[in-house]
Amino acid sequence: MAAVKTFFNRSRPPGDPTVAAPGSRYPRFGSPWLVLIAAAVVIYLGYFWFERRVVVGADDVLVLMRKHGTRSVAGDQVIIPNAATYPGGADAWKKEFGDANGILEGVYLTGTYFGFSPFDYERQVVPVVTVPSDKVGIVIRKFGAPLSANQVLADPSRGQRGPLPGYLQPGRYPEYSNPYAFEVKLVNPVVINPGQRGVVTLMAGRPATDPNQYLVSAGEQGVQRTPEPEGYKYINPFERRVTPVFVTSQRFEMGGQDAIRFPSSDSFEIKMEGFVEWSIDPDMLPQAYVAYSEGGELIPFMEEKVILPYARSYSRLVGSRYTARQFISGDTKLQFQKEFSENLMRKCGEQGIRIHQALVRDIVPPDAIRNPINEREIARQQIKTLEERIKVARSQAELATQEQMADQNQKIGEANKAVVTVVKQAEQARDVAVTKAQQELAVAKLRLEAAQKQADALVARGKADADVVLFKRSAEAEPLRQQVAAFGDGNAYARYFFYQKVAPSMKSILTNTDGPFADVFKQYLSNAQSPPVKATGEREKVTEVRP
């Protein structure tokens, strides 16, 4: 220590106030010891503030893992349970976990903590577990003793791991926020709507006394005898399960592909169409659910496995007592529907199905029988209708006859008087009309004779005009006929006119002695007694023809 003091004091001048006085126990103000102490305090405070300080927010919790112990937790466990809730008590906890390393079950809530050294603990801030308003929380304990055989729920008093009984309603649960110790599964609440009942299946309970029965007694594992009423249920699915099923009226159509076909007593195939209105008996719902449901669906399987087979069976039993011809009659249809409905209600009621109505809409026999019988029945009904109409018409005719006879006798006298008057007036009008017609006939005859004479005069005048035109045209055509006759025929006369028109315009012609054109001029020159055309055998150049 003296050497240290000498080291710090040897470089300072005498009288320095920072140098300790001789024989003094404490250093003066500003001495190196004070600096070291201050630095140590600052370092220690910094260590506390930056290293040991853990701030846990309002929505978080602090999870600790102890690592300053002398051994690890026994077995396959990693969680150190709370001493207050340990099944063996505080002494057993201290003996088992007092100096063990592991993750502490308990968590620390919102705040600032300085008491957990990073050398002694691993610290982790995790979000607090929150169950939303539309969910239910199921707690699964991850540490403790394993479950026994056929055990579903963990027993907290025995420190077992597994699903815990009960459920968490919407809210915050810091005690279950340690993700290494617990897992909170969020599931939907069970909603049993109006018109539904819930089939309850107990998952955790004592084994069934008689496992060969569909339903079990209360508290035993299996489907319970009492259904759950409608409502909003918070349920732990590891403890029990509730399946909502409609118990309101359903309608099952038997038509088209689902139409029922059965043989009549005379071996004809009969087709029946209709519908069944039904519902499930709420008191027998659990038994029906166990017996007929598959995958949670009950309504379709009840129709497929109960109603439809029974409908087919009883339609065959009842229908086989009637012939195909009888099914066309309305009385037989009503009797068939009555028996069919009664049998179906009785048998389906034993299976927990209430049949409110089983209506046969139509029964269709084969066309080979139906058409002739229908036509005959229609004809028979038409005959009855016509007979009734004839009776009504006869009654109406007799009444009308009596009324008309009375009216007729009254009107005969009036008609006789009117007939005499009308006859006399008609005779007078006839005489006047005949006289007038005779006069008009005489006038018409005179007009006809005059018109005939005018027509004859017009015809004579037309013939005279036609003769004048004919004579005039004949006189004009006679000179031309004589000229043509002088030349022999019309071609020669036409050639003559052609030569007369063309010859004055021709000055010279370039041709040879052969050919049709030279023959024309040879004939012309021979007729005019001209000297012959010089035949050189070659074409001569002449001037062009100009008019």
Image: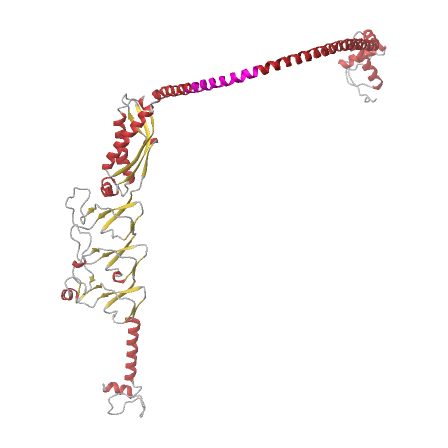
426 vs 175: above or below: above
Residue 340 in sight = yes
Where is residue 398 drawn, in percent x and y?
Answer: 47, 17
Q: Tell me where residue 433 sits by quadrant.
A: top right
Residue 533 in sight = no
**Residue toward you, 336 or 193:** 336
**Residue toward you, 166 or 250:** 250
Q: Which residues are magenta?
A: 388-412
| Horizontal side, residue 358 vs residue 528: left or right | left
Where is residue 56 drawn, in percent x and y?
Answer: 30, 67
| Horizontal side, residue 510 vs residue 189: left or right | right
**Residue toward you, 344 or 156:** 344
Quadrant placement of the N terminus: bottom left
Quadrant placement of the C terminus: top right
Q: Is residue 330 magenta?
A: no
Q: Tell me where residue 102 sits by quadrant.
A: bottom left
